[in-house]
Amino acid sequence: MYRPQQCFAWCLLISGLVIFGGQSVAAAEWGTLSGKFVYTGTPVKQTDPRTPEDQSLIIGPQGGIKNIFVFLKDRSFKQELIHPDYQKLPDQVVIQHQGDHIEPHAAGLWQPHQKLVVLNQTPHLHLTHLFPLKNHLPDSLHENRDRKKLIPFKHAELFPMLIKCDIHPWESSYLLVQNHPYFSITDETGAFQIKNLPVGEWEFRVWHERVGHLAAREDWERGRIKIQIKPGKNDLGVVKVSPKLFEIKTVDKQ
């Protein structure tokens, strides 16, 4: 074959691979993972109005457990497996000092596509302290009123990191930083949903600030769940969580 013909043939082959690859991505199947965590005990109500609300365990009116993190665990997750709809997410995740707490109390961030914004909506000075394992950040951020701090992350974190105010120690929150957007945080009904997951077998983690790994079911060792994600709906159903799980005392929640 003459050289011009060889070049033409290679061009056709490469074009075919690109088209085929584009079709395979477009035709990929996706699934949604959902579930609901319900507290089986009686929530303890805070009676002293002078004491800031304890947000470490929030139980909704119907018994749902708020602020449980559920996230896909894969440190080398391939970016081409991420559904294109996630590109529409905002490029910033905002947490703010508001009243006597940090809002929201639990948040997730897709690194490197999103950056963290820390705001102070109070008239008081705050020293916001982040506790990452993988990222090198300033020990504390001086937060005057209406001052905005923009924080990028170079690495994904293994688990949700603690954020607190060094001046007001009761003000705290948790931030999950991952290299993909496949995570969710339960609302006050205890429900969560992760949309547009690529089909296949994946490992997920369940984590709560009181205990770290949350083994809410017998086969969820250290909060690990292996699931075969199928096209369409994948529902864990109602997960009943005993109060005893939140009584576990542990130094290392990681």
Image: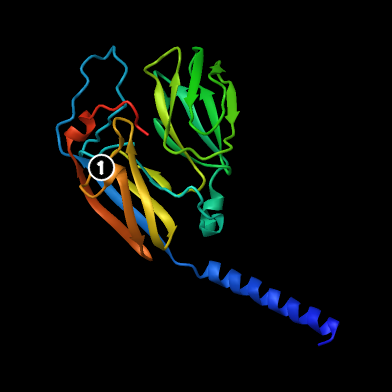
Question: Is residue 7 shown above or below 40?
Answer: below
Quickly name the residue at label 1.
Answer: 215
Q: Split into 4 quadrants, where in the image is the N terminus?
A: bottom right
Task: Identify the residue at the far front of this view.
Answer: 1
Q: Split into 4 quadrants, where in the image is the C terminus?
A: top left
Q: How is the image coloured?
A: rainbow
Whether residue 121 is visible, yes or no, is: no
Judging from the image, what secondary structure is the residue with disc 1 in? loop
- Does residue 222 appear left or right of residue 42 in this picture? right
Report the amino acid beneath label 1: Ala
The crowd level at tag 1 (other Cα within 10 Å; few <14, some 14-19, many 20+) is some
Picture quadrant of residue 145: top right
Residue, x 32% and y 17% (percent of image)?
52
Query: Residue 172: where, in percent of width, then height?
Result: 40, 23
Picture quadrant of residue 22: bottom right
- Does residue 2 appear left or right of residue 251 in this picture? right
Query: Closest to the observer: 225 or 176?
Result: 225
Task: Identify the residue at the far bottom of this view.
Answer: 1
Whether residue 240 is visible, yes or no, is: yes
Query: Residue 68: where, in percent of width, then height?
Result: 33, 39
Picture quadrant of residue 138: top right
Residue, x 55% and y 42% (percent of image)?
111
